[in-house]
Image (spheres, helix red, strand yellow):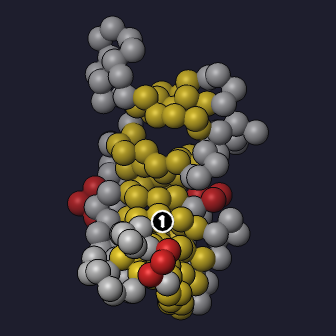
Amino acid sequence: MVFARYVVNLCLEEGEPCTVLRLGLSDGRVIRLADAVVPVPTPHGSYVAYYRRSDGAVVVRDLTAGKVRAVPGGWSRAAGPLRHLSPAGRYAVVGSPCQVVDTISGEVHTLPFTPDRAISFSPDNAYFVAYVDSQTVGKPVYVRLWDLADRLDVVSYLPRKYRHDAA
């Protein structure tokens, strides 16, 4: 299986604009993404999503099969940055406030919370997981789970002793 190891945005070839991004692959190849803006790989790197420079569409590229597909619906970079891509490229997190986009159907759902950090998806694409900090000492910190199929918000509390700012 081929996966992305890193994204390079250096001017490697004379005369080529520095905005041409490249993906370094696990098999040693480098793929030019001449039309990509802000690529975001899946956690294991077999898919990458980005805004296509030519028309602003969000596209998902399967690095193993070499296929590229546009996400249905009208997209532009004004929607906000691509933040995360789920395993198998099924869901993308876009913008602020965060929206979860089904990259196959084009369905969009705004999250009922704003993640602070440690955003991820469950390996089976069933849940979106985020860390939410209240930013106030003594207030609870939550790990938020959002059920992607049922659009249900599940909240889990982290005791103070596990907080990053706990004394």
Give the x, y percent position of residue 119. Answer: 48, 65
Q: Nearer the viewer, residue 133 or 67?
A: 133
Which residue is labeled 1 in the image?
119
Quadrant for the C terminus in the image: bottom left
* Residue 106 is at least partly visible in this image: no
The residue shown at (38%, 50%) is: 51
- Name the quadrant containing residue 10: top left
Asked if residue 156 lies left or right of residue 12, the reply is right
Give the x, y percent position of residue 106. Answer: 48, 71
* Residue 122 is at least partly visible in this image: yes
Give the x, y percent position of residue 9. Answer: 37, 28
Asked if residue 65 lies left or right of residue 58, the reply is right
The residue shown at (53%, 65%) is: 120
Q: Nearer the viewer, residue 102 or 6?
A: 6
Q: Nearer the viewer, residue 98 or 141?
A: 141
Q: Nearer the viewer, residue 61 or 92?
A: 92
Q: Is the residue 26 above or below the residue 159 in the image?
A: above
The residue shown at (39%, 14%) is: 12
Instruction: List the single residue furthest toward the top.
Output: 14
Instruction: List the single residue furthest toward the right.
Output: 1
Give the x, y percent position of residue 139. Answer: 33, 87
Q: Amino acid at mark 1?
A: Ile
Instruction: List the single residue furthest toward the front.
Output: 167
Number of residues whose C-alpha sits closer than 10 Å to that of mark 1, classed few (under 14), some (14–19) or many (20 or more): some
Instruction: List the single residue furthest toward the left.
Output: 78
Q: Say which element carries label 1.
A: strand
- Counting labels gives 1
Q: Is the residue 150 above or below the residue 118 in the image?
A: below
Q: Is the residue 129 above or below the residue 39 in the image?
A: below
Quadrant for the N terminus in the image: top right
